[in-house]
Amino acid sequence: MAKREAFLQAVLNGATDDFLHFIQLHKDATDPFDLNERLQEMSRKQKEALWEKLKQMLAQVLVEDPVEAWQKSTEDDEDDMETQTASKKEHSIAVIQGVTTVVTTSIPIVDENINYTSLLECALILNGIIYTLPDTETSLLRALQGLCEQWWTKGLNGKEQFGKTTFILFLKNSLEKKTVAG
C-alpha cells in the first residue's frame, strides 16, 4: 500500500525522477513493485487522476523537448551544450517510456465504469510521436507499437487509429526484414 501511494504521489506531484524510479522498480524482477498490481488496487478516481497527471507530464516533456528536435544535428554546438542536449533527450525518452509503460499496463484494467478520456489522450499523444521518432529509439518504438496493438485488441475508443498504426508498423517491419534478407 505504501508504494502504491508513493507512486501515485510522485505522479500527482509531477516528480518525474521519483516516477522514473518507480518505473525502474517495476522493470526490476527482484523488487516487489508490480505496476499492474498497484493499478488494480487504485480506486477509479485515483486511476483517473493518475492518467490526467501522466497526460500533463507527457505534454510538458514534449513541449520542453520536442521529438522533432532530437533529429537535428548538433554539430555546431559546443561539447558542453551537446552533453546537456543529450542528457535532456535521455530524460525525455525515459519519461515517454515510463508513461508508455503505465498506459500499456492500464489498458487491461479499463472498463465501462472508468472515465479513461485522459488515458486515451495519453495514448493518442504517444501514437502521434511514433512516426517522428528516430529509428535509433528501437526500445521506445517497440513499446509504442505494443501499446497500439493492445489498445486495438482491447477494442477501446479510438481503436481504429491504433489499429492503423499497428498495421503500418507491422508492414514497415516486414518490408525492412525482406529488404535486409533480400
Image (cartoon, grey):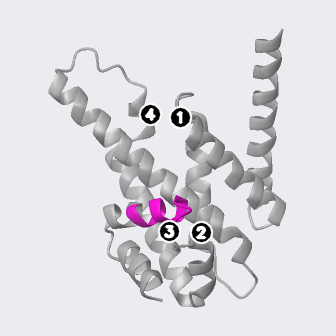
Tell me how far mark 1 sits from mark 3, CA to CA: 26 Å
The disc labelled 4 sits on which kind of residue?
Glu
Quadrant of the image containing the C terminus: top right
**Which amino acid, by three-letter code, is at mark 1?**
Glu
**Horizontal and vertical percent position of residue 85:** 27, 34
Number of other residues with Cα within 10 Å of mark 4, as a class: few under 14, some 14 to 19, many 20 or more: few
Dot 1 surroundings within 10 Å: few (below 14), some, or many (20 or more)?
few
Provide the secondary structure element on which disc 1 rests: loop
Mark 4 vs mark 2: which is more N-terminal? 4
What is the number of the mark on residue 68? Answer: 4
> Which is nearer the N-term, disc 2 or disc 3?
3
Q: Classify residue 129 by image quadrant.
A: top right
* The stretch drawn in magenta includes residue 161: no
- Look at the numbered discs 4 and 3 and tell me whether their residues touch, using CB distance below 8 Å: no
In front here: 165 or 170?
Answer: 170
Q: State the separation of the CA atoms marked 4 and 2.
A: 23 Å
Point 77% across, 44% down: residue: 166
4 and 2 marks in contact (CB < 8 Å)? no
Q: Which of label 2 and label 3 is nearer to you?
A: 3
| Mark 4 or 3: the one toward you | 3
In whole angstroms, how far apart are the C-alphas of marks 4 and 3? 35 Å
Q: Which residues are magenta?
A: 21-31
In this picture, residue 60 sits left or right of residue 153? left
